[in-house]
Image (cartoon, rainbow, N blue to C red):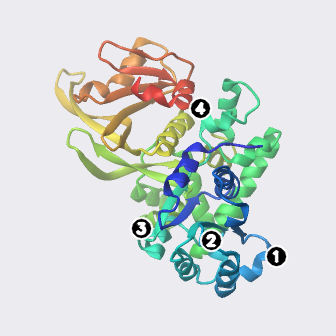
Amino acid sequence: MKIERPVYLQQLIDSKDNGLIKIVTGLRRVGKSYLLKTLFKEYLLKEGVPKDHIIIIDLEGRKQKDFRNPDYLLEWVDGQIKDDKQYYIIIDEVQKVDEFTDMLGSLVVKENADVYVTGSNSHFLSSDIATEFRGRGDEIHVWPLTFKEYMTAYEGDVIEGWQEYYTYGGLPKILSIKGDDKKATYLRNLYRTVYLSDIYERHNIENKAEFEELVRILASSVGSPVNPTNLANTFKTVKRLNNLTDKTIETYISYLENAFMIEKAERYDIKGRKYIGTTPKYYFKDVGLRNAILSFRQTEENHLMENVIYNEMRHRGFLVDVGNVYARVKNEKGDWQRVTLEVDFVCNLGSRRYYLQSAYRLPDEEKSEQEKRSFNQIKDSFRKIVIVGERMKLRRDENGIVLMGIYEFLQDYSLLDA
């Protein structure tokens, strides 16, 4: 099964021959190796690069253990470079090489060597890139399949595909597994034997039960504000756990972020044009993994749709925040009071900005006006979009607010500016 990843392939093409180490990062089993060893290799061959000028070193297998010695690897690569034409060196699971940063530094200074690597989460997390490579690296971060990518390989209609996607997520292997039970088992096993193991190996966590309970709470809180102090109080009063402080919870959350399992959406004061350092939201980079953590007991489409929209805009390269806008309204007594309204997502990329609301259903005018209420308080000219969880042709109301369906939004990138 071939799944095209055009966005990431183009990033690799744009970074080709730039003198930096191309570092492909992302959640485990997200398709990093496939991107480099299959899609990028095919591109190079089509561009006329001779096959023997593409050097692939896969360190996953036992037979490749000699390459874990950096001196052996460098000497072997030197032996493969037989002329002054450009060579493309692809190293999969580079963290298995001893002193791999020094080894890569030696490779990248070769005049006719262009270097690409992947690394696993237990030794090669997002925080490592800046510290280990210090300006010599060019990071390309890979997300799970978008719905559009997913549907290129899914055998079924778009509605069935959407139901499968928000239930089992976008890890590529899911598309080749038949049957709900097997898909669920695959994701549950992956969470325990790969993702949790990576974090435990990296950070030597002793209180594993408490850590996993926190992960479950975050999974069930998608789309809701998260306050570490409140969580610590909950653990103390309900779970009788006094050692899980707010600082410990913040540290545990950072482990999940660095392992690419979750991502934080900060709060942004739209009118004040500043960040508010309170109650961010966290979204899972793969909704299937999130559902597996909860044993598929909480698969409400409305919350999962919000998570998918967040991931979609991040995949498109946007910075995504949660927006706050303040308004004065009359209460039941007729008195004016200040209230805080929320915009689900404030999305920025260069000079472009979009305000997005995720609205699972708009059954009547009252619900429609409720979803638009925060938009009506924003007086700038950036596009304001309500995304509805059904098929819907794009339309605008009298205030210029755009409404569109989730299927259309996920599959047609041009609709943001339509």
Label 1 near label 3: C-beta < 8 Å? no
The label number, if any, that marks residue 265 in the structure image:
none
Q: Nearer the viewer, mark 3 or mark 1?
A: 1
Decide: few, some or many residues near mark 3? Use Cα within 10 Å; few <14, some 14-19, many ≥20.
few
Q: Nearer the viewer, mark 4 or mark 3?
A: 4
Residue 240 in view (yes/no): no
Per the image, label 3 sits on a secondary structure element best described as helix
Q: Residue at x 44, y 70 (%)?
A: 130
Left of 373 or right of it: where is 379? Answer: left
Q: Amino acid at mark 4?
A: Glu
Label 2 near label 1: C-beta < 8 Å? no
Picture quadrant where residue 327 is located = top left
Q: Amino acid at mark 3?
A: Lys
Per the image, label 2 sits on a secondary structure element best described as helix
- Between 308 and 7, the one lying in front of the other is 7
* Residue receiving disc 3: 247
Sooner in the amino-acid sequence: mark 4 or mark 3: 3
Question: Residue 223 location in percent, x, y?
Answer: 47, 41
Left of 335 or right of it: where is 92? Answer: right
Decide: few, some or many residues near mark 4? Use Cα within 10 Å; few <14, some 14-19, many ≥20.
some
Sooner in the amino-acid sequence: mark 3 or mark 1: 1
The label number, if any, that marks residue 200 in the structure image:
2
The label number, if any, that marks residue 63 in the structure image:
1
For marks 3 and 2, give the CA distance. Answer: 18 Å
Q: Residue at x 54, y 82 (%)?
A: 102
